[in-house]
Amino acid sequence: MIEYLPLKRITAMHADEIHQTIRQVVDGGWYLRGDATARFEEEYARYIGTKHCICVANGLDALTLILRAYIYNNILSEGDEVIVPANTYIATILSITENRLRPVLVEPRIDTLEIDDSLIEQAITPRTRAIMLVHLYGRCSYTTAIADICKRHHLLLLEDNAQAHGCTLPPPDPSSSVPYVAILSQPKTGSLGHAAAHSFYPGKNLGALGDAGAVTTDDDLLAATVRSIANYGSSRKYVFDHIGRNSRIDELQAAVLSVKLKYLDQDNARRRAIASYYNDHLNHSMPNIQWSVNNVWHIFPLLCQHRDGLQAFLAENGVQTVIHYPIPPHKQACYKEWHSLCLPITERIHAQELSIPCHQAMTDAEVEKVTEIINKFNA
Ligand SMILES: Cc1ncc(COP(=O)(O)O)c(C=O)c1O
């Protein structure tokens, strides 16, 4: 069986360094809010290109605390609207509703699966205060049109970067032959707006060995407020300025992330090479997702009218796949009030999407086998 995402093999790629750093933390006897966290926060802020990185317990907390900090700082208030792609993972939406803000769902483009920037302006109302971009599947969803809309309407530009660690703006020459260094020198997702949330869930491009997340921003006040809320609302011991919570990263996870961050660009380059092979060799009759050279391919999505048949055929032939995601947020039981919304592109993506294996530990033989089997599928 070619597993969809064999975490054991991915961890084994750097097993010695990971074991060594875990031993150091265990033997050091300091397990929270210590040197490993401070070091990773500094390294990740430098990597993303922001002034601040604040580590928190997971990606959902990172999103939620950004919005809550803006509420505490009187920049957002209850009932304000946040524009968000309709085809995101539920966590993006949860962070908005959990703060008593109102998500306004905007359709994606079928050829990129990212928010359709031509539909944003018509979704703006007098209550709109922010656009939450989601760099879904590892692809940059920022466009200059979106930045321009934010400027003209005085909106916050926020990023959910849970799936796109290491992704950049497209280089000036976006052809497939552009050298990798030219892509890496571009500004990174997570630094393109006012604040960004990152998840280090184990299956992410930069994954911990458990839950972890982070907020990146250049905004000093926002950074201080997020840090305080994540620490019970306290910035000085036993003094509580905000109604906060406990949202900490373990020293063990921070130490592991420091090791894995060193290999992130290399891992993303391997994902890109696999995606490029699929792009060139899959001869199925499915609509093509537009190629983009700066994509970090957290997920390689296929759209297929006979998705369930293709998934079963791949399973019979020893290839594990995953659907991201079977039910869109507006059709979930927890959001009954949106069941009548008409979002045909989002619904089509959820009915047709199939993610095939694409990760840094995959061998060429595995990539070729997956391609060969998909090409044999007759719907
Ligand atoms: C787009 C997106 N946003 C937010 C999250 C939430 O991250 P976490 O699982 O760390 O809470 C995830 C992943 O799980 C995600 O894919």
Image (cartoon, rainbow, N blue to C red):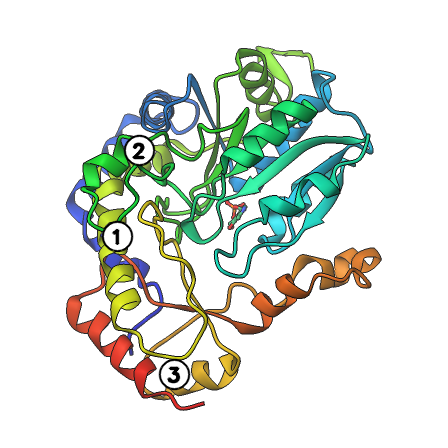
Residue contact at pointers 2 and 1, CB within 8 angstroms: no
Looking at the image, which is closer to me, 176 or 105? 176
> Residue 353: where, in percent of width, then height?
51, 69
- Rendered image: mark on residue 315: 3
Q: Which residue is mark 2?
A: 255
285 sits left or right of 124 in the view: left
Q: Quadrant of the C terminus?
A: bottom left
C-alpha span from label 1 to label 3 = 24 Å
> Residue 232: where, in percent of width, then height?
63, 23
Name the residue rendered at 43%, 62% in the picture. Answer: 289
The quarter holding residue 184 reads top left
Q: Which residue is mark 1?
A: 11
232 sits left or right of 184 in the view: right
Looking at the image, which is closer to me, 28 or 163? 163
Q: Quadrant of the N terminus?
A: bottom left
Q: Is residue 85 above or below residue 355?
A: above
Give the amino acid type for the residue marked by disc 2 in the picture: Ala
In terms of sequence position, does the residue under pointer 1 or pointer 3 come before the other? 1
